[in-house]
Image (cartoon, helix red, strand yellow):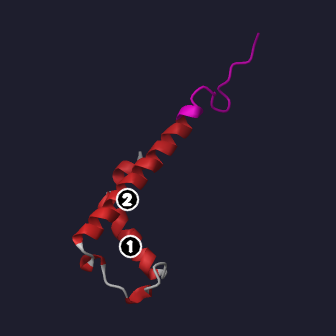
Amino acid sequence: MWTEEVAPERLAELFYHYEHALGVSGKGSESGSWNEVAQPEKDRMVAAARLTLLDLDSAASQAGRSRRYFAEPGEAEWGC
């Protein structure tokens, strides 16, 4: 699954970057870099990113399971 290829630390760093670039937190681009964030805050954001990846992976696998009983197009056998 693609979510296994994404490191939670990298997701948290990118989220932090884009959140501040878009001014979501009201600080805009004048806020500090990821390296200036306190370690407890980084740990919290990484934990949130890890949960996000688990949730995305779970949703994708549930969608796959719900379709496993249906044939792919052209594979169904028609007959009596």
Point out residue 52 in the picture as x, y percentages from the top left corner: 42, 55
User: How many marks can you see?
Assistant: 2
Residue 25 is covered by the magenta coloring: no
Magenta segment, principal secondary structure?
Answer: loop
Query: Residue 14 sits in which quadrant?
Result: bottom left
Mark 1 Cα shell of 10 Å, populated few (<14), some (14-19), many (≥20): some
Of all residues, the one furthest to the right in this rendering is 80
Q: Which residues are magenta?
A: 65-80
Residue drawn at the location 44% of the way across and 46% of the way down:
57
Asked if one can make out residue 61 in the rendered structure from this viewpoint, the answer is: yes
Mark 2 Cα shell of 10 Å, populated few (<14), some (14-19), many (≥20): many
Residue drawn at the location 25% of the way across and 80% of the way down:
36
Q: Secondary structure at mark 1?
A: helix
For the residues marked 2 and 1, what is the alpha-carbon distance in whole angstroms?
Answer: 11 Å
* Identity, as a three-letter code, of the amino acid under mark 1: Tyr
Q: Which numbered circle lies on residue 32?
A: none
Q: Which numbered circle lies on residue 49?
A: 2
* Identity, as a three-letter code, of the amino acid under mark 2: Ala
50 horizontally vs 43: left or right: right
Point out residue 43 in the picture as x, y percentages from the top left corner: 27, 63
Of all residues, the one furthest to the front in this rendering is 40
The residue where tag 1 is placed is 16
Point out residue 47 in the picture as x, y percentages from the top left corner: 32, 57
Query: Residue 67 sits in which quadrant?
Result: top right
Residue 74 is covered by the magenta coloring: yes
Of all residues, the one furthest to the left in this rendering is 39
30 horizontally vs 24: left or right: left
